Image: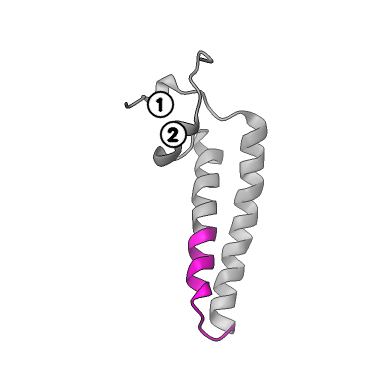
Amino acid sequence: MSISREQLAKVRTPFRVLAGFIFVLSFFALLATVTFAFTEPYDHIIWLLGIVTFGMSYISGHVVFTGYAPKFLLFTHGAKDGL
């Protein structure tokens, strides 16, 4: 079942503000991860930190700038008519 974007309600403003806050924090976390990767000895946790922080920044940035979740999370939206 595919629902077009026109049938979905945008994310409400308080949640977009929260996503913006998470986006800023994840940006700093990406910078910290890069710094950690260059200053500490190699460890596999660097890859996990990078994937998690990039995922957080991608999802929260998409919500902030478009008002919708990424395509793989569109099932979380409600319909415009509230049903």
Q: Is residue 33 above or below residue 52?
A: below
- Tag 2 residue: 74
Q: Which colour scheme is used?
A: one colour
Residue 72 lies left or right of residue 41; in this view the side is: left
**Within the image, what quadrant is residue 82 found in?**
top right
Is the N terminus in the top left, top right, bottom left or bottom right quadrant? top left
Q: Does dot 1 land on a helix, a strand or a loop? A: helix
Q: Which contiguous range is marked in magenta?
A: 40-53
x, y percentage for residue 5? 40, 26
- For image coordinates 51% across by 83% down, the residue present is 42
Near mark 1 (Cα within 10 A), the count class, few <14, some 14-19 or many ≥20, is: some
Residue 2 lies left or right of residue 11; in this view the side is: left
Residue 67 lies left or right of residue 22; in this view the side is: left
- Tag 1 residue: 5
x, y percentage for residue 36? 59, 76
**Residue 47 part of the magenta segment:** yes
